[in-house]
């Protein structure tokens, strides 16, 4: 089993201890096994599955299987695999639960379960990657919007800072017109305005560097070529 970006988690829901031991032991024999938790039907509730990437359901008592499958298939966030005793039950379950992976307990069923489960976890991982990429893209758009806003506001901010600095300089030069306490406050205003001015200057330098980097990157980008065939 390949390594997943985040540590995958699997929940086994069954009232058959031997089924749980068999599946857990087989999965733990993999070089990179997911975290496996076992729960019986007495503690099962739909909210439990929300914390897992994959739920494997097996034999349970008192006809609870349908309720468990209904809950699992109503959640798009969790993949599910169901193991049945008889092959004849598979078509009906596929018809009722189109998104459910169903395996019957034939020879080698545990290996089949691991293969199907690994594929389900890969799909979950792909969803995680896609969601993370969407979040990063949104953050980039927000940062870009903020950067554009600052660029648009920069002339006005610089004008305001220039005015504050100029007036503070004039008041500081007119020592007769300011008492000691007022002069100290003016000095603070002058210092803070100068610091803001330095920040804006640095922002201007960064903006120029980014524009230069974009032009250089565009100049170095080779023209698009025909796609290379991939073999499987």
Image: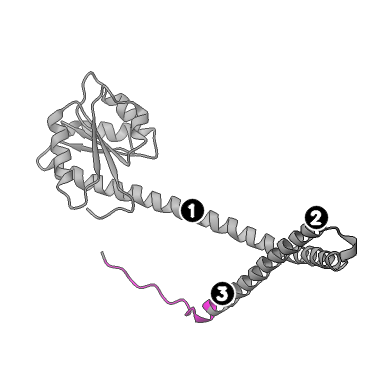
Which residue is denoted by mark 1 in the rendering? Answer: 134
Q: Are marks 3 and 2 in contact (CB under 8 Å)?
A: no
Q: If you read the primary sequence from the N terminus, does the residue marked by circle 3 or circle 1 appear first?
A: 1
Label 1 residue SS: helix
Q: In the rendered image of this protein, does residue 171 appear above or below residue 44?
A: below
What's the magenta region? 217-231
Q: Residues within 10 Å of mark 2 (few under 14, many from 20)?
A: few
Answer above or below: position of 178 versus 46: below
Q: Whole-percent x and y of residue 105? A: 14, 36
Q: Residue at left 76%, top 66%?
A: 158
Q: Nearer the viewer, residue 51 or 207?
A: 207
Q: Nearer the viewer, mark 3 or mark 2?
A: 2
Name above or below for residue 154 compared with residue 84.
below
- Give the residue at mark 3: 214
- Give the number of the mark in front: 2 or 1: 2
Examine the image and state in which quarter residue 211 appears.
Answer: bottom right
Cα gap from disc 3 to disc 1, whole angstroms: 23 Å
Q: Position of residue 51 (x, y in %)?
A: 35, 37
Residue annotated with mark 2: 181
C-alpha separation, residue under disc 3 versus residue under disc 2: 50 Å
């Amino acid at each position: 089993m390949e390594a997943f970006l985040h540590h995958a988690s699997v929940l086994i829901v069954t009232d058959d201890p031997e089924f749980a031991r068999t599946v857990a032991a087989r999965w733990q024999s993999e070089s990179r096994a997911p975290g496996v938790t076992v729960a019986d039907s007495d503690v099962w509730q739909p909210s439990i599955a929300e914390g897992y990437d994959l739920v494997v359901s097996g034999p349970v008592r008192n006809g609870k299987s349908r309720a468990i499958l209904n809950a699992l298939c109503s959640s798009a966030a969790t993949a599910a695999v169901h193991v049945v005793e008889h092959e004849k039950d598979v078509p009906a379950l596929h018809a009722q639960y189109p998104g459910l992976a169903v395996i019957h307990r034939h020879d080698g069923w545990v290996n089949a379960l691991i293969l199907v489960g690994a594929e389900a976890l890969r799909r979950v991982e792909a969803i995680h990657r896609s969601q993370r990429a969407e979040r990063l893209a949104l953050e980039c758009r927000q940062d870009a919007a903020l950067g554009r806003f600052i660029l648009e506001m920069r002339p006005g901010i610089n004008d305001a800072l220039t005015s504050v600095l100029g007036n503070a300089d004039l008041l500081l030069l007119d020592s007769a017109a300011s008492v000691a306490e007022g002069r100290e406050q003016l000095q603070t205003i002058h210092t803070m305005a100068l610091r803001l001015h330095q920040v804006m200057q640095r922002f201007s330098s960064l903006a120029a560097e980014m524009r230069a980097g974009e032009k250089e990157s565009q100049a170095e980008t080779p023209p698009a070529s025909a796609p290379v065939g991939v073999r499987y």
